Amino acid sequence: MRNTVVSVFVCALVIATSAAPVTSPAGPNSAQPQLSVSSRGVLLSWIERAGATAALKFSERTATGWTPAATVASGTDWFVNWADVPSVIRLSNGTLAAHWLQKSGADTYAYDVRLAYSKDNGKTWSKSFLPHSDGTKTEHGFASLIEMPGGSLGMVWLDGRAMTPGAGEHAGHGGGAMSVRFASFDTNWKQTAESLVDDRVCECCPTTIAVTSEGAIAAYRNRSETEVRDIHVSRLVNGKWMASAAVHADNWEIDACPVNGPALAASGRNVALAWFTGVNGQNRAFVAFSKDAGKTFGDPIRVDEGGTLGRVDAAMLPNGDAIVTWIERAGSVSDFRWRRVSPNGNASAPVTVSAIASTRSSGYPRMAIAGNTLTFAWVDTATSKVLTAEADVK
């Protein structure tokens, strides 16, 4: 495995514009933003709190602004976490699919992934259901949803069914191993798969999934027997998940979960994967490209400017370039930034979307692209609200 790192070369031909604020549809006490894209454009989801009640809400971007916020579901027994974020996506047939997290037992990390769908643009929602059938009161979270070929729903999540509830450094994160699992549902919402992707992974780093012209690819932070926690990918080939492989041999040995997952973007056979590493005490963010649907990846290209908290996101442009976001940190100052990167290492100058808190309460800032417009969402901790902005990319 190569250990070469490519430095970005700032190229004047790559045009980037600053981000302009857009009035957010989110209300007070909102957080956990997530962005997805369909043929209708960008969809934003988030959690709003009112006392003990948490509600999953969503809005879609139109030419005249965000649509009025609509509620998917709410509850007083939800598991709400800064990094384990619910989502809403729109499938190509117009159906909306959503997931959130609901407590299943008294232990801190005893919770389930709940799914629901709407066929009337969010006016009504199905009764919620589970993608996992193990029935254990352990962690099921960090889910990532995607539309599969044929219009069906696919998803991966972290699954703690083999772990010991209430044990270890973090309750439920002690004995046994965390796994990544996959489920799929057909267009009639019949479950068509529940399968293992990887049987030993980092306990609380977000997952990501994308679909290439050759099938689905998942990425996550692996965990070796010697506590090396590098980013791995696995591909779904003929209905079976292939043995995972490291995107790059960072060899980051850490006896704890950094709560810092990767981000995937794909178009055809082109794939971009962004991630964070803290190997040798140096916090860095990288992106690597694949031209063969994720079978192999090129050398990592560093995207941060000298220090980062990670929390990356990625989107693919039609020509194979990628937009990568991250939280840059210099001393006590942190910014939500983005830049455009080409597989050959050419890149735009970094663009700051907004200042952002370096605490966990700022969560994971998000980014999506529709046409030539980038949409950003992040938590402003000063106002306890999800904010949004846009930028053009050419």
Image: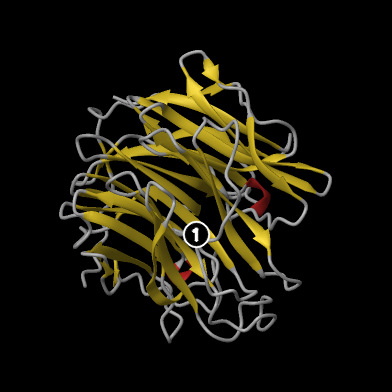
140 and 129: which is toward the camera: 129
Q: Which residue is mark 1?
A: 206
Q: Identify whether 85 is placed above or below 283.
A: above
Q: Position of residue 317 (x, y in %)?
A: 27, 36
Which of the two residues, 57 or 379, is positioned nearer the viewer here? 57
Q: Is residue 88 above or below residue 394?
A: below
Residue at the image point whose x is 49% and y is 33% from the top = 43
Q: Nearer the viewer, residue 89 or 325?
A: 89
Q: Does any portion of residue 234 appear in the rendered image?
A: yes
Residue lying at the far top of the rendered structure: 64
Residue 272 in view in this figure: no
Q: Residue at x 24, y 55 (%)?
A: 215
Residue drawn 76% across and 72% down? 106
Asked if 169 appears above or below 381 in the picture, the reply is below
Q: Nearer the viewer, residue 286 or 234?
A: 234
Q: Position of residue 294 (x, y in %)?
A: 23, 58
Picture quarter containing residue 319?
A: top left
Identify the residue at the far left of this view: 292
**Rendered image quadrant of residue 137:** bottom right
Percent x, y of residue 291: 16, 51
Q: Residue at x 32, y 25 (%)?
A: 371
Q: Quadrant of the C terminus?
A: top left
The three-letter code of the residue at mark 1 reads Pro
Badge 1 marks a residue whose secondary structure is loop
Quadrant occupied by the N terminus: bottom left
- The image position of residue 251, as x and y in percent, is 37, 75
Q: Characterize the local packing of mark 1: few (<14), some (14-19) or many (20 or more) Cα atoms within 10 angstroms.
A: many
